[in-house]
Amino acid sequence: MLTKVTPRSDLLMFVLFTLAILAMPLWLAPIGAGYPDLLQKFAIFGLFALGFNILFGLTGYLSFGHAVFLGVGSYAAVWSFKLLGMNPLPALLFSVVFSALFALAIGFISLRRSGIYFSILTLAFAQMSYNLAYSVLTPITNGETGLRVLQSDPRLLDGSGSDTGPLISRLFGIEMTGYSGFYFCAVLLIVGFYISQRIFRSPFGMMLRAVKSNQNRMSYTGLNTRPYTLAAFVISGVFAGVAGGLLAVTDPLAGAERMQWTASGEVVLMTILGGAGTLLGPILGAGLIKYFENIFSAYNEQTLHAIFSFLPDVIEAPVVSIAGLFVGEGWHLTLGLLFMVVVIFLPGGIMEGLNRISKIFSRSKPKPKFTSSSQSAAAAE
Amino acid sequence: MEILNVSNVNKRFGGLKALDEVNLSVEQGHVHAIIGPNGAGKSTLLNCFVGRLIPDSGSVTFLGKDLIGAKPHEINQIGVSRVFQTPEIFGDLTLLDNIMIPTLAKRDGAFSLNAWARVDGLGEIRDKALHMLEDVGLAEKKGMIADSLSRGDKRRLELAMCLVQDPKLLLLDEPTAGMSRADTNNTIDLLKRIGERGITKIVIEHDMHVVFSLASKISVLAQGTVIAEGKPEDIKGDPRVQEAYLGGAHV
Amino acid sequence: MDAIVLQILNGLDKGGAYALIALGLTLIFGTLGVVNFAHGALFMLGAFCAVAFNHVISLEQVVVDPTKITAWGTPLETRTPYIEVWLGDTGTTLLNYSVPLSILLAVPLMLLFGYVMERGLIRHFYKRPHAEQILVTFGLAIVLQEIVKSYFGANPIPQAAPDVVRGAMDLGTLIGFDPGTIVYPQWRIVYLFFSLGIIGSVFAFLQFTTFGMVVRAGMADRETVGFLGINIERRFTLVFAIAAMVAGLAGVMYTPILPPDYHMGMDFLVLSFVVVVVGGMGSLPGAVSAGFLLGILQSFASMNEVKTILPGIDQIIIYLVAVIILLVRPRGLMGRKGVMET
């Protein structure tokens, strides 16, 4: 990084981040992303990617089954609604506890291996959980239909039956939908960002980077790598669990498809698109992917015809049919291509791209011949 | 006083007997060199000290503690550090981080969930690390990424990473292999300066110049057994040693 | 006893598919050092070669006969596949053998695709970290399956086996069981022998040709082979193309067993990776035997007797085996010591 990191610069970064997140409804409105459903997704998946980054970005362990914790978080939250009532706070507590337990168990086993073996182990656990959620665990997960809150559920804290309206999560009477739902998610994203920032700057974070860099040297330096990686795994699992819990808070239902490995792949993409190992990158990546998903999947043939209507008919028809491959149902094709393009050309993600651009600009400034080297040395500090 | 005791250590790889009833006693404060032709089992022996290999039989004790079966990080935590033949460093971290990590490992132990403190707030650790970098002459490169160093600098960095932990026993696996004469001499000087701190060292080395300018005791290993042991002057004239070398790998 | 034999047989055809995909995965990993997450997509592409071939040869000539009126009052249309119009009975036979015949299309197509994929993409990832290899091939797999989806739709497209082998066969009577106890679809027997044939040819190719010798040497010690001055890169391309073809052929012939859909590759990929891990990364015999072994295990786990004791076991058995193997014997059943053990 070019600028020196100090407690003051971190505080500034945190304050700016907080303001930017809270003001999202304002500055995202002009690009058509200022409505609550999408904003909630930004915050929730930002949190998911932020947590994934603590594992993948710092330690380099590529988990291909992280969506399990998202799913577990959702199921736990819905069960909290069913048993305790529609308050989001106990629901999130449930999410934290259960995702932590799952992460502890899966991490304990998977982290005995590294490299692609770790990826395959996490994938195997994810597939197992997904398959079981659809089959024998149906009493807990409600199988294909998905788990939802029913009027007949006990809901001990807010009393079953007394509430006849729609079953919506409420915090002190405020409905967790729309903008209030977004602000609830945003607050958790901000808390998550703060935790992530602390970890990045802490000795613990430095040790996680050391894991990525050279495990051999680490153990000959007297450090036990296993608890470090396990701690990172559990922390990132809990982030995912809270994100899953928030999905349920904003819309009280949970389904097994949340645990599918395509969902795990999506969070990997978000993280690398933004820049794995950077603080802001994963949130940026999550936002971009959810934004484009929203835009691209909304297009259909009519809207495309409307867009390309300025073209002569001979050209318009093929253009529309080609463009049609990438939008609507074909959004996944765009996603796959994006995946490849990012890995091939910009493995450091958008943050690295921005870094490169800023370097080009700072280099192109005319400078006296001799100061440049000392300046860059000072900058490197 | 004896710091490391190796008795009757055996290690086989398939049909090959890599170590055959090796006995070794390393005295506190000495620089003990282990020499021998290629394939004599020197590195295998070193690997048995740090938990990388477990001998088939025999015992290795360090200050009375059994090292066999202990994990590498546990062995380091009781005061044994190792420099490798090809430098093992944290390649994509800065030099300063490279030194701060072992310093923290020494202070906080094998694991500490120190996620709330700030690295830039660790004044004492940082000062110690900077001081160490100065000692090995890398202070002005502290912000550089370790992978961008020259091979010689990487070795010095690795040495600094070990030294900053104030080990009781330092294992050096061919610390000058592949170095130019000038770099070799620099390293010898550096090692001599460390000698003043009273750290016990075991050095594996091919270069006789290095061995005779550093070692206070030499063990000669050939085909997995110690064939001679003694002061450098004695070893120089020993006919068995000359035979092992001339009849061995140097043909 | 007969139930056990039946379950073993049931596992064999699936095992054959796993083995063929795992064989290619291992070949690619062992020689090129690349983790190919798009290998399942190659299997799927093979299956769609069969679909495409069938589409093409069953294109129909529509003849409208205005003199005859149907019950709905429209002129009578007779539809005849062109191939029957041109070739008569031979055409009918060709149509009937559409699945095995599509091998003729799949071989060159998959070889070409493998060649292009290796030259255009994989080559640039030899020296990149495994994580990036996984990610880029994962991206490619998504792209391939989405393209297939946009042309062929999301629904499975059943393919018929040729009439002669469409029925079932009472295998039990051949080996002394009572009639009717072990009845087995004939196409599955064909598939089993087909996969054994392919596996045999790949092994023979590697064993008896100079090319194969170099490839095997490369799998054992890549650096040394590079030092010998052998242009290993050129051979890598061919290895990749062959692995792609093997996966494709596995897909073509599997279509009568499982109607292909666009995401079948992903399902098979995850399982085949598990097979590779269980067999031992970089071990060809390991991949093949683990493929069959896991296929059989899976079919045992789906027996009702087993499922009542261990509900859901059929869903997770393969993953469970993988987890246990990775923890107990990380190099897999037949992996070499020290190869990718951590």
Image (cartoon, coloured by chain):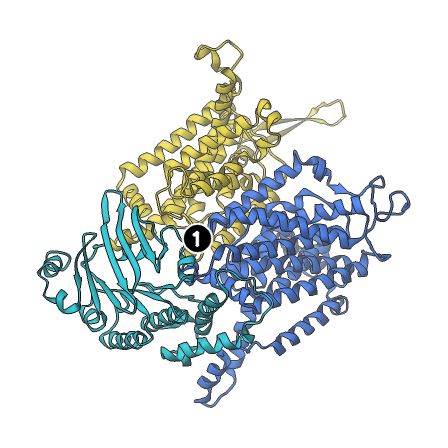
Chain colours: A blue, B cyan, C yellow
| Chain of the residue that carries numbered disc 1 in the rendered image | C
Residue C285: x and y, percent?
37, 36
Left/right of residue C72 with respect to residue A340 in the rendered view: right
Q: Is residue C334 above or below residue A280?
A: above
In the rendered image, the residue lying farthest to the front is B1
**A8 shown above or below B84:** below
The residue shown at (45%, 62%) is A213
Does residue C20 show up?
A: yes
Residue at the spot x=66%, y=72% of the render?
A14
Residue C109 higher or lower than A357, as above or below: above
Question: Does residue C109 appear anywhere in the picture?
Answer: no
Q: Is residue B148 left or right of residue C309?
A: left
Amino acid under label 1? Ile
Residue at the spot of label 1 = C122
Front residue of B219 and A260:
B219
Q: Residue at x 85, y 58 (%)?
A: A172
Q: Is residue B116 left or right of residue A59?
A: right
Q: Give left or right: position of B40 versus C116.
A: left
Q: Secondary structure at mark 1?
A: helix
Crowd rating for badge 1 (residues with CA inside 10 Å; few <14, some 14–19, many 20+): many
In front here: B115 or B212?
B212
Choose between B161 and A169: the one closer to the eye.
B161
